[in-house]
Image (spheres, grey):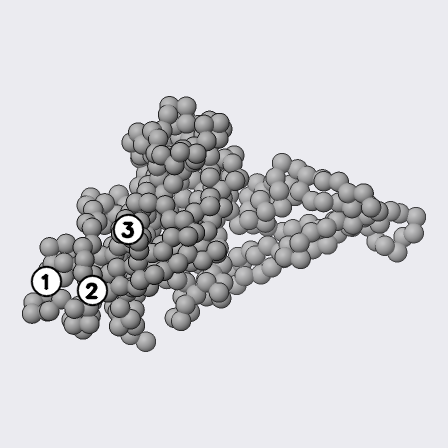
Amino acid sequence: MLLKVSCNAAVAAYAGDQIQAKCRVVGQSPSRPNLPRRHAVAFSSPVAKAPLVQAVVSEGRASRVESGPGGLADRLRLGSLTEDGLSYKEKFIVRCYEVGINKTATVETIANLLQEVGCNHAQSVGYSTDGFATTTTMRKLHLIWVTARMHIEIYKYPAWSDVVEIETWCQGEGRIGTRRDWILKNYATGQMIGRATSKWVMMNQDTRRFQKVSDDVRAEHLVYAPRELRLAFPEDNNRSLKKISKLEDPAQHSKLGLVPRRADLDMNQHVNNVAYIGWILESMPQEIMDTHELQAITLDYRRECQHDDVVDSLTSLESIEESEAVSELQGINGSATATANNQERLNFQHLLRLSGDGLEINRGRTEWRKKAAR
C-alpha cells in the first residue's frame, strides 16, 4: 500500500536565523515479510493546532481518501488564527522570482502576499474556497466581494530569503462593504516593515451591480472580526484617507495600448487587482525608477477590466496644490527629472482608462523616496 504525496511536501520552519526544511518518513520495515507494507509521511510543522492530513491511499488498483478535519495544504501552511481567533498570521519566505534588480521584493510581490494571506484567513474561518471568500448567505444570493480601494505603505522592502510575517483582520465598513487591514513584519527582527488597508464592496455576481450588505451577511461575516475598532492606520489624516482627484489630459507620461495577458486573469474571471499596479508603473518615468523606490501606493478601483480590454496608463507629477512635499519646492519647472534632482520624496497621480472610450478603470497615487546610497 502506497501513500501518494507531492514531491514538494516539506515545511519550511524558522529556527534561529536560518530556514530548514524538515520531513521524516516512518512506517514498518519492509524487511519483515510477515507484515503488510505500509508507509506514511509525517511532517514537522511550526503551525499550532494544525489539522490532520488528507491523502490519497492506493492499494493495488483501488484508491481511497483518508482524511482528518483539514487538508494537506492546511497542514503545511505556515499560518493560523491568533489566540483570540479574530485575526490571522502567516509567514512567507521571499523567493528568488519575487525580487527585482535590487534583490528585494517588488511591490507586486507584496500585494500578492497580502491577497494570499487574506484568502487563507477566509478559508481558515470556513468561508468558501472558490476564490470569492463568501459566506453561506452570499453564495445563496450570488454575491461576491470586489475591491474598491487599496492602500499599501512599505517602510523597508524584504530581501531574497527574508521571512515576512503578515497579520490580517476584517471589520465592517458602513452599510455597503467591509475593510481588511494588514501588518507586515520582518519575522527575524520583529520590525514592522509595512502596513496596508483595503475597502471591499458587495456585488451581485450575475448582474455585476453593487449591493448593500444585509444584516444576515453582516452577522455571518463580523463574527470573526475584532470587537473593538482596530486600524492598521490609526493616525488622524493618514495617507490612506487621502482622496485621489482625476488626472486630466494631457498627462506628462503615458504608456498606451496595454493588453491583459492570460496570466493576469484570476479565478473570478477578471483582471486581478495586482495587475493594475504593474500597469501604473509602466508609465512611470525611468529616471524616477532609477533614483527612487515606491513608498506608498493608493488605488481606487472604478471598473472591472476584462481579458479583451485595451488599457492606457497615464502618469503626472502631482500638482503643488495636491502635494505638500512638492509645494515646498521653489524654482522647479514641474518636470519629473528636475524635481528628482531636488527632492527626496515625490508624489505622482495615475489613471488607467480604456483606450477606446476613455472610461476610467482605476485612479492611483504613488509616493516615492530617494533610494539609499550603496
> Within 10 Å of the Cα at label 3, are there few (<14), some (14-19), or many (20+) other Cα atoms?
few
Q: Position of residue 140 (x, y in %)?
A: 48, 27
Q: Which residue is mark 3?
A: 357
Q: Position of residue 127 (x, y in %)?
A: 50, 35
Please tell me which residue lies in front, 149 or 22.
149
**Nearest to viewer (mark 2 / mark 1):** 2
Q: Which residue is mark 1?
A: 328
From mark 2 to mark 3, how far is it between C-alphas? 20 Å
- First along the sequence among labels 2 and 3: 2
Q: Position of residue 187 (x, y in %)?
A: 44, 56
Please tell me which residue lies in front, 45 or 71.
71
Q: Amino acid at mark 2?
A: Gln
Which residue reaches farthest left?
331
Residue found 84% across the figure and 49% down from its top: 37
Which residue reaches farthest top?
215
| Disc 1 element | loop
User: Can residue 292 be seen in the rendering of this structure?
Assistant: no
From mark 2 to mark 1, how far is it between C-alphas? 21 Å
| Disc 3 element | loop
Q: Position of residue 208 (x, y in %)?
A: 38, 36
Q: Amino acid at mark 1?
A: Glu
Find residue 252 and name its label.
2
In the image, 287: left or right of 327? Answer: right
Please tell me which residue lies in front, 130 or 226.
130
